[in-house]
Amino acid sequence: MRTTFRPVEELLRAERVIARRDHPELARTLSHLASTARLVALLPGVYASPSAVEFDTRVRAVLTWNPDCILVGRAAARAWFCAGLSDDPCRGAW
């Protein structure tokens, strides 16, 4: 990413996802990066780097989007105690 996108890079490095509502000053930048496929919207207003979209990033996106959400079933098992589950319980969820 270019220098003008440094705040986005720093946030992604620290948090793995960025919520537009938490950073309204970056709204236009986030929209631009998503429209050019440099970011992917995992949920409405929650973005991540396309190369970092994995189970842990998706869980972080859900918790960022709604801190009161509850993981259930295989997603909960993988997140909390069965890290060795071979398939992604979130595949196809969004």
Image: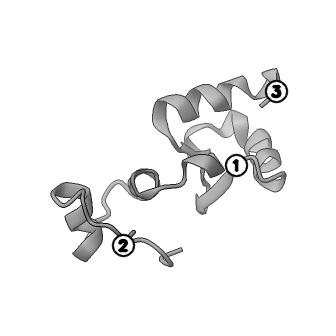
Mark 1, residue position: 39
Front disc: 2 or 1: 2
Q: Which residue position holds label 3?
A: 2
| Cβ atoms under marks 2 and 1 closer than 8 Å | no
Measure how far apart labels 3 and 1 are at the Cα level.
Answer: 13 Å
The answer to which of marks 2 and 3 sits earlier in the sequence is 3
Mark 3 neighbour class, 10 Å CA radius: few under 14, some 14 to 19, many 20 or more: few
Residue 15: give x, y in percent of width and height. Answer: 47, 36
For marks 2 and 1 on the same chain, the one whose residue lies earlier in the sequence: 1
Mark 2–mark 3 contact, CB under 8 Å? no
Task: Tell me the quarter of the image containing the C terminus.
Answer: bottom right
Where is residue 87 shown, x and y percent of the image? 37, 70
Q: Residue at x 84, y 51 (%)?
A: 36
The numbered mark, 3 or 1, whose residue comes first in the sequence reads 3
Which amino acid does the dot numbered 2 rest on? Pro
Alpha carbons under labels 2 and 1: distance apart: 22 Å
Q: Is residue 44 left or right of residue 83?
A: right
Q: Amino acid at mark 3?
A: Arg
Residue to which mark 2 is pinned: 89
Element type at marker 3?
A: loop
Q: Residue furthest top?
A: 3
Of residue 14 and residue 53, the one placed in the foreground of this image is 53
Coloring scheme of the render? one colour
Query: 80 or 5, which lies in front?
Result: 80
Q: Is residue 36 above or below residue 90?
A: above
Q: Position of residue 90 (x, y in %)?
A: 42, 71
Q: Are marks 3 and 1 in contact (CB under 8 Å)?
A: no
Q: Secondary structure at mark 2?
A: loop
At 32% across and 63% down in the image, what residue appears? 69
